[in-house]
Amino acid sequence: MKIVCIVQARMGSERLPGKVIKPILEKPMVLYTLDRLSKSRYIDDIVLATSVENRENPLVDIVSNAGYNVFRGHESNVLKRYKDASDKYSGDIIIRVTGDCPFVDPVIVDNVITYFEMNQFDYVRLDIPESFIRGFDVEIFTKKSLDKVYDTVSNMKIDKSDKNSLEMYKEHVTYYMYKHPDKFKIGYVKGSNFYNKEYRLCVDTLEDFKLVEHIYDHFKNEYVSSKEIVKYIDKNPELCKINYNVKQK
């Protein structure tokens, strides 16, 4: 069974354009995500999935030059982008991560993979934000489930009142899965009290970026563990004020 991690990223972020290539300690942010994922014991292939738009060219160059696979597909229909990327790289199990999570932890990722495989789920996600800190996000699902969602969504016949739902299914790869638990065997990896905190460690705004930049500047270690990061914020709660007012879209 081949496990392929597909990392979605693009340059056109509304709140912080070009965020995925903004440098942290002189290294583009997206490479922290990819390099940390490369430490997983179970992932066989890592693919950066972006759009065919010309504005993605700097991102593509950076990731390709770092030695990672790049797939270019549909910009707004991210579901199709994942379907096409998974077809090309022949994954049996697909992991979804976003390029704006530079603290993604390979230990957590491997824990989710193990839970998924032990219980024969169709789809498993980290229990974010209910019992896990946002920024350590990881989702995993079978290729068969992805194909099923793609075929279902592509053949939907809906009226204008349901148009927003269709667009959500296309934009958010796994949205259809967890909205239809009757059609998929779904699991959640819940966090302990240690991880059940309202910290925000993904990057969507400049405030988010400043917090991430501060943490990496403090540790000077691109592979700093999630535990070390959480302990550091626990001891320095004023750090949360940097992006406390940022609302998740």
Image (cartoon, grey):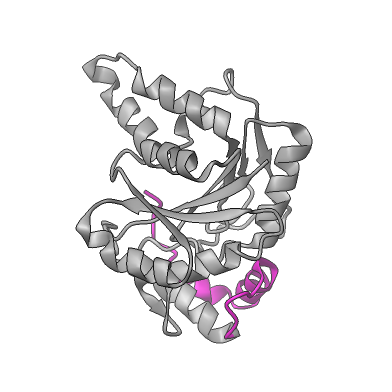
Quadrant, the N terminus? top right
Q: Residue at x 52, y 22 (%)?
A: 180
Image coords of residue 190 (percent x, y): 69, 45
Highlighted magenta segment, given as a residue range: 220-249
* Left-right relation of 18 to 232: left
- Image quarter of residue 81: top left
- Image quarter of residue 158: top left
Q: How many marks?
A: 0
Residue 235 forms part of the magenta stretch:
yes
Image coords of residue 11 (percent x, y): 29, 61
**Residue sitting nearer the eye, 243 or 75:** 75
Q: Residue at x 35, y 17 (%)?
A: 155
Q: Residue at x 29, y 28 (%)?
A: 164
Residue 186 visible in rendering: yes
> Where 37 sits versus 74, above or below?
below
* Left-right relation of 56 to 35: left
